[in-house]
Image (cartoon, grey):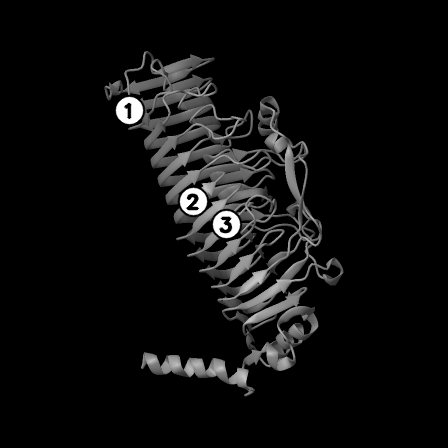
Amino acid sequence: MKRSIYLILCICLWLPEKGFALSGFFPVKESGITGDGKQIETQRLQQVIDSCHLSGGGTVFFPAGDYLSATLQLKDNVTLYLSAGARLIASDRKELYTIRTNLSDTGSESTPMLIYAQGAKNIAIKGEGELVAQPQYYQTPLGESDFIRDDIQAAKESGVELLGWRWKEPAVTLVFLSECQDVSITGVQLKHSVFWTLHIHWCERVNMQGIYIYSDLEKAANADGIDIDGCRNVTISDCIIETADDAICMKTTNGTSGYRDCENITVTNCVLTSTSCALKLGTESYGDFRYIHFTNCIIRNTNRGLGIFIRDGGTAEHILFSNIRMECTRKPVGWWGSADAMRFVVLKRNPDSRIGGIRNIWVKDVYAHVEGTSIIAGYEGMKNISDIILENVTIDMFPETVSDQRAREGILLQNSERLTFHQVSLTWKDREKPNKWTYPFYLQDVSEVTFNRIKPGQTSPDYTPFCLENSDHITITQSHFETSPSTLYTPKGDLQNIEIESTNKYIPR
């Protein structure tokens, strides 16, 4: 029975290629489209999509070939199917892109698109083929940035040349879908996008599965992989993503029509590489992020593993990172990341920005091979990060592989409260401690922090596992040390209610 169904499907795919009409099936070469990659096919391809839509819907079929085009608009009930060997290539002629995004805070005032949909329902992009852009990059002096001010200062002190990459127009995003419902993107490959590769904006009920995304890891400065922007009810699974900018990122951008929240989203079974952050919320954060789960992922050759950046007044809550293995290595200055396992921070984009918050975050069953300091930090003078749990987390920290070293602490906690660390191991993997390494755990202006069954590794024979500064209600229980520390913590400033129970258990050399 299964074999019969398969044969029928093969015949259905074969007949249109031989000139036979089939209801709901629209092979593009039946409309005089050559697929030779030499001429712009935008108008004819759009006519096929429109015909499919007007007939009630169906599949627009791309057989093997190269199809050069500017923006194509998907419409209700239309599936684009790119067969193996089919490449839909974004034209590099700027003047052909008459439809552009209008989201001013995305880093581009007006972004050209290869595939676009506005308010469409029941749409899909499927197959084994490729969507491809044609980027042209050039190197330029790196500008100053408050967001990475400390990174730039470290580079200057080490004599590192401050250079970054920019792109020539058009800076095409391969897919931009806005206010759509019932969206499916499966199987296809998306390559060399200049800007955000796959931008899903204000959509509901979206499924992405088994796709491959690639951009130049050295040059593609704004080429995110997948950006979920103000969407609800989204699933992402079984994807392989290699991008210079963030691999998978949730955003709540602010445009001419305002912003929307991101909620009810799962990301699972993905393999990720990024010169920036692999799994991230923000930095565009005008709306809230709720009930978002990242599970069962492998992160390799990446500048930062997990990130939550609230800069515009939104709140991130009920977020889970679970069963993740990561390898983070330092990238050149200018990229956002320090080879750290995680950075959860509340900032202000500008002096007039609202101050948001982060709460109810669970990081569970994570192994991290890193070079940089992990940071959990609320806004200065406020404790607007709260209720964070790290459980069964192992961080192995290695010396940085670049000259402009930044790492100081293993984990830095600032301006936050109600934090729980249970079965957390932090090991300094090189006994010859780099000059800037200090404490495994540094706590500053925090309250109600509990450490249970902690194993902080040493930085020197006379190391101190914790530094506590202007903090209160800190509890350390049943912790294990590689050597017996001369003191358990270094006190600074005003400390209150420090409780140490069943500690000073240590593992002798």
Which residue in the structure is indicated by mark 1?
A: 479
Label 3: which secondary element:
strand
The quarter of the image holding the N terminus is bottom left
| Quarter where residue 341 is shown | top left
Residue 80: image location, x then y, percent: 55, 70
Residue 284: image location, x then y, percent: 60, 44
- Residue 242: image tag: 3
Instruction: Classify 11 as above or below 139.
Output: below
* Mark before the other along the chain sequence, 1 or 2: 2
Instruction: Classify 379 as above or below 174.
Output: above
Which residue in the structure is indicated by mark 2?
A: 299
Q: What residue type is labelled 2?
A: Ile
Residue 439: image location, x then y, percent: 41, 20
Q: Distance between the residues labelled 3 and 2?
A: 10 Å
Would residue 93 appear left or right of 265 to someone viewing this image? right
> Is there CB contact under 8 Å for labels 1 and 2?
no
Q: Distance between the residues labelled 3 and 1?
A: 38 Å
Residue 474: image location, x then y, percent: 37, 22
